[in-house]
Image (cartoon, coloured by chain):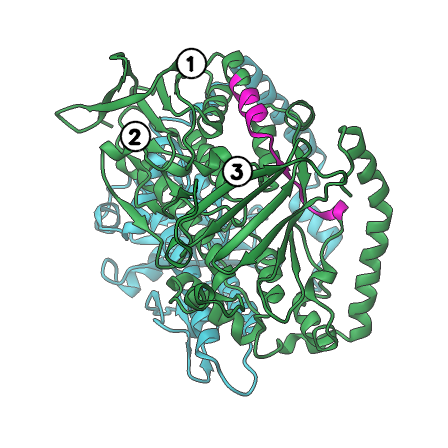
Amino acid sequence: MNETRLIKRVAIAGGGITAWSAAAALKRRIPSLEIVVVSSPPLVDALADRIGNTLPSIGEFHSDIGLSDEDTIVRARSGLRNGTAFRGWADGLPNYVHAYGSYGAAVSGVAFHQLWLRDHQPRGRPFDSFRPADAETGFGLRLTIDLYQQLLRDYSLHLGVAERPGEVADAILRGADGFVEALLLTDGQRIEADLFIDGTGPRASVRSRLAEDFEDWARWLLCDRVTFDAAPPDANPTALDDVMATATGWEWRSPSPTETLTGRVYSSAHDGDAEGAIAIRQGRLSAPWVRNCVAIGDAAVAVEPLEWTNLHLAHSQIDRLVAMMPDAGFAPVELAEYNRQCNAEADRIRDFLCMHYVTARRMEPFWRDATSIEPPPSLAHTLTLFAERGRLPYYEEETFARDSWLAVLLGQGFLPERIDPLVDSVTPEQAESALSARHQRVAEIQPSYRGTFLQMGQSAPL
Amino acid sequence: MPCRTETALTPYTSAIAMRSGWRWRIPLQHRTGNGYVYSSAFIGDDEARAALVNAVEGEEIAEPRVLKFRAGRRTRSWVRNCVAVGLSSGFLEPLESTSIYLIQAAISGLVELFPERKISPVDRDEFNRLIDMEYDRIRDFLILHYHATERSDSPFWDYVRTMTVPDTLKEKIELFRRRGRVVKYREGVFLDASWVAVYMGQRIIPEGHDMRADLPPLDALARSAEALRADIAAKAAQMPDHRAHIEAYCPMAEAA
């Protein structure tokens, strides 16, 4: 090996949730690192730093870095969410819910959705009427952004992370090999480090100095504008967020404990530019990690918040960074494996989002355009295979479980042409008795689940 | 070549490296199976037969038979209305006992994608994609056993030690050599523990380590490793001898 020196100094650029999450995770799990966060307020288009709705995976991230529910839910005043209610995405069909858990009950190896296609779909019972009960659903958080960011910053500083407020003006590259030598701040200060982590949002102030390798997804995901707004909190907030299709995109409504957050995502080509709209460019870097500089969060992957994956992607990148930390030689084989995993994950999330549009049923010009795009090959394969007989292919680094795909596909009326012949091995009576056994189990756990939530000081959105 | 079981009835198969390949030793209740898997480019059939006879323990029950095979897989297991399952889809030597696994993987895949009247090309392609993936991952794992060797006492081992291996395997080895990372799969028969066992066993020792390993204090780690060792030893001491257990649990009727 050419270089066995360990990485010692890490500089993280960015002052939002993404950057502070990286700082806390790295310091907590690899305490020998000397970490400095070059902090500046996150920019408006850094969605991982601004979107408060998160997936259930956030719970694992917190326990990995030593934060409890008391810290992240009670103290940071987060709400709890169990899924998303999609409204108006398929003309002529009821609204549907994508909840994080399993739908119905499988019997003897026969997937529930196949039984549903035979027994329930013909009678007009929507797939999501079999969605998991609250007690069985994974829950994500509705973060109160400023409190949560403050929590992560305080925690990082407590762990021994240093903060250096400042704006990155430039990254100084070493002549010999193009590695980043130091960050040059607007006040003239130099910040040197072995590893530079870029959490500055889509502009990627540091990482963009090494290579311009952004792969644009605009041909698959047509929306390119987002607006944010807020309303007073609901008296009885629900655990579901609303995502309503509009003529040129969609809008959301999230009742968090402190306020009700709303927003709109749309295509400027179909709707012009609203005042105060923030431009987003969906896509990813072809290699988030180059030499001694790795982009995380929106600097690596930028997607619309449709399924609340923005912070999930950042967490997942941070987890990999911790697990795959190389030495100061930055061997290409190690970076390549990191990039392979990150890219596979990002592409599959892109597919999942794109699937919402191509299987939607609406008549406006935007929707006609959005449904008639040619999907990415991996999504095309998924849809063709599913359309045959309701089977979903398996991919490495898949974020969303099979039932999440099913909830959206079947919720939007994208039905397979045939029912799997395997269903013949299960009678409708057997299927029905498996369902009622499941309801029985849920009835037993539901009260204690509710109690747990009440204890967390929540306004019981159940 | 079957022999009488005269030595220990081990609860594992032995794969013993030979000059031009390797041989297996599979102890059963009524006999011990033996075989020599070799490369005909490096050793003749008669010489191989003699080497096997010479190496095995126990009185031989039958003469060795020579079987020829060509390692590889079909480019497409499923073509039109004909699906190859098991050995008709490909042949990998029995080094890691994968033949039956591959049969079962093909059957499960076929059950899941079973065609009705009309065969859909999509189902067929998905089946082929899954089977190819299984074969290719096992292939890399088998090649690792040969390539990661320090033997230099015969032309066969000189060849496999220095041969070009598939890029997918080259990357896996290099990644492990750096910091002990195993390329992550969620599917496939051999997962992390299997890869680590062969890497370490054949002395591909990582040059660095995962920085998270520095976190727990060394003496605490040593204490818990010691506790684990004692726990395993205590449990193992309670276990009956393998032969005694088999005789008590599932004895075979005497062969007629």
Chain assignment, label 3: A
**Residue A281 image offset from top left, x and y in percent:** 36, 46
Q: In which quarter of the image is residue B92?
A: bottom left
- Whichever of labels 1 and 3 marks the residue nearer the N terminus, that label is 3
Say which chain is green: A
User: On the picture, is B48 further left or further right than B6?
Assistant: left
CA distance for labels 2 and 3: 21 Å
| Disc number for residue A351 | none
Residue at which label 3 appears: A51
Residue at the bottom extreme, as displayed? B117
Q: Which amino acid does label 2 sit on?
A: Ser
> Is residue A218 left or right of A52 when viewed as pictured?
left
Label 1's element? strand
Q: Residue farthest to the front? A: A275
Kind of residue at badge 3: Ile
Chain B, chosen colour in render: cyan
Q: Residue at x 48, y 43 (%)?
A: A227
Residue B86 in sight from this viewpoint: no
- Within 10 Å of disc 2 (Cα), the crowding (few <14, some 14-19, many 20+) is many
